[in-house]
Image (cartoon, helix red, strand yellow):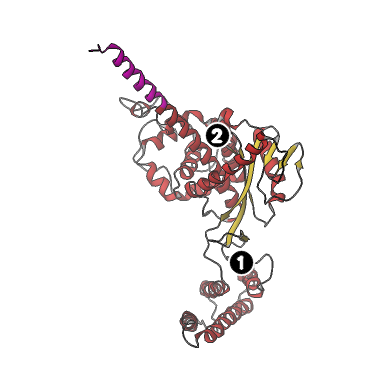
């Protein structure tokens, strides 16, 4: 794809510019002037050709759509639809005049995320830290981890076996392989028996039906491996190996497969009463103690203990900010070294001689919990819809960036409200001064 040419700002509307028609104190309007868009254009232009291919969409447009998507908790389709109806979204994207048409196809956002990768998402996150200015300059941090759940159904062996059967039937149909038996009606009857397991005598029949479903899945996988042509077998080799691995795994095995379309998904036992298991990936967060700016957001696919995630999280913080943290305050669940490089790690423990300042910092660590909660429920991290391990990493960093951008937008709102209140108080005090007393 060829890099598009930048539009000339001299060619504006017939009468007025889009900028003149908007409220210039709107938080999104102000945020558009705080972000250094040139940074993204310089960094991402290497992913495009200068001579070949169709002209691409402007880099600022694509980056702004990613930011707005996370900021407003919308899907790719939702942000593309709302962009054409929202003049503030368009100004934020660099438009000089209002455009009633959609900016791009929703699939172009998917391709843009693939193009920039984790490195590009981290650059957006780095810019969100810079926008917060001095508020992000704090050597005392709070750290915690959470689970970013994947968009999969609750995994059971029976669900996986039935999905294997459907996928094998689809492969046979596409490759024109004649199966000895399709088992479509048989699986349907077995599913009815499984649904009646709470009836009298139904539990034993349901167990037999579940075993038969597994047997059918194994038969279809083996039959495809025998009947597929060498070329077709090479194309479907990864899927057939995945199916075989699912059929062979036991209850107590480690590194189990919980989803066929997201095989990297892990199971995390968090010990919560309302949710004993969470299926996804682990995310590590670091925030400043005094202001709550997210300065570290990293995803881990392996089932690591919290102490194993901190070195990489500290390294990311140093890479993004260019400085070392003095102290990181953690919860009681952390077990591990008390120092990483020049950074001291603190966990609360019974200590009669603890200073008042340190006690307050341990109490302040709890402020990271609502930050993580808002990142999940307000900025698309409660359920990750992006594909693969790279999608997990991108979603965590974009959610953290959206949280930082939202914070600075709230400050813009607060400053405006305080200014309005100041002038209102000044007006009433002036009226009171000039009104004669009886």
Whether residue 263 is situated above or below residue 112 in the rendered picture: below
**In the rendered image, which quarter contains the C terminus?**
top left
* Residue 235 badge: 1
**Residue 127: x %, y % from top left:** 57, 34
**Residue 370: x %, y % from top left:** 53, 45
Residue nearest the viewer, comparing 58 with 365: 365
At x 55% / y 38%, what residue is drawn? 51
Relative placement, left or right, of 321 versus 428 is right
Relative placement, left or right, of 348 versus 127 is right
* Residue 209 badge: none
Residue of label 2: 41
**Residue 249: x %, y % from top left:** 66, 72
Residue nearest the viewer, comparing 417 with 241: 417
Question: Which image quadrant is residue 294 in?
Answer: top right
Query: Label 1's element?
Result: helix
Residue nearest the viewer, comparing 105 with 428: 428
Query: Label 2's element?
Result: helix
Residue 2 is at least partly visible in this image: no
User: How many marks are shown on the rendered structure?
Assistant: 2
Relative placement, left or right, of 296 versus 340 is left
Whether residue 353 is situated above or below residue 150 in the rendered picture: above
Residue 254 is at least partly visible in this image: yes
Whether residue 327 is situated above or below residue 312 in the rendered picture: above
Q: CA distance from mark 1 to mark 2?
A: 38 Å
Region rendered in magenta? 418-438
Relative placement, left or right, of 252 versus 84 is right
Magenta part, dominant SS: helix
- Residue 188 is inside the magenta segment: no
């Amino acid at each position: 794809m060829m890099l598009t040419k930048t539009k000339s700002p001299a060619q504006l509307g017939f009468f007025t510019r889009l900028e003149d028609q908007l409220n210039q104190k709107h938080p999104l309007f102000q945020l558009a002037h705080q972000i250094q868009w040139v940074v993204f254009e310089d960094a991402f232009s290497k992913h495009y050709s200068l001579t070949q291919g169709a002209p691409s969409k402007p880099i600022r447009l694509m980056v702004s759509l990613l930011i707005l998507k996370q900021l407003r908790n919308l899907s790719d389709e939702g942000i593309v639809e709302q962009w054409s109806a929202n003049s503030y979204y368009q100004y934020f994207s660099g438009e000089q005049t209002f455009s009633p048409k959609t900016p791009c196809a929703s699939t172009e956002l998917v391709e843009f995320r693939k193009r920039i990768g984790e490195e590009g998402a981290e650059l957006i996150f780095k810019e969100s830290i810079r926008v917060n200015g001095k508020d992000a300059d704090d050597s005392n941090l709070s750290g915690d981890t959470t689970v970013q759940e994947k968009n999969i159904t609750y995994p059971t062996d029976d669900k996986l076996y039935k999905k294997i059967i459907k996928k094998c039937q689809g492969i046979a149909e596409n490759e024109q392989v004649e199966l000895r038996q399709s088992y479509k009606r048989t699986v349907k009857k077995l599913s009815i028996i499984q649904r009646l397991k709470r009836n009298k005598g139904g539990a034993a029949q349901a167990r037999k039906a579940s075993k038969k479903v597994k047997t059918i899945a194994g038969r279809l996988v083996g039959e495809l491996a025998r009947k597929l042509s060498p070329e077709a077998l090479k194309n479907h080799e990864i899927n057939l190996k995945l199916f075989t691995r699912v059929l062979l795994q036991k209850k107590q095995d480690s590194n189990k497969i919980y989803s066929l379309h997201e095989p990297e998904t892990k199971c995390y036992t968090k010990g919560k009463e309302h949710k004993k298991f969470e299926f996804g990936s682990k995310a590590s967060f670091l925030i400043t103690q005094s202001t709550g700016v997210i300065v570290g957001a990293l995803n881990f696919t392996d089932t690591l203990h919290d102490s194993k995630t901190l070195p990489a999280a500290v390294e990311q913080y140093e890479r993004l900010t260019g400085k070392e943290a003095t102290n990181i305050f953690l919860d009681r669940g952390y077990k591990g070294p008390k120092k990483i490089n020049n950074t001291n790690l603190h966990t609360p423990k019974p200590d009669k001689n603890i200073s008042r300042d340190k006690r307050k910092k341990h109490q302040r660590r709890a402020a990271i919990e609502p930050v993580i909660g808002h990142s999940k429920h307000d900025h698309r991290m409660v359920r990750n819809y992006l594909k693969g391990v790279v999608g997990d990493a991108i979603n965590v960093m974009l959610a953290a960036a959206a949280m930082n951008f939202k914070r600075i937008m709230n400050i813009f709102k607060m400053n405006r409200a305080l200014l309005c209140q100041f002038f209102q108080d000044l007006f009433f005090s002036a009226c009171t001064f000039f009104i004669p007393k009886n």
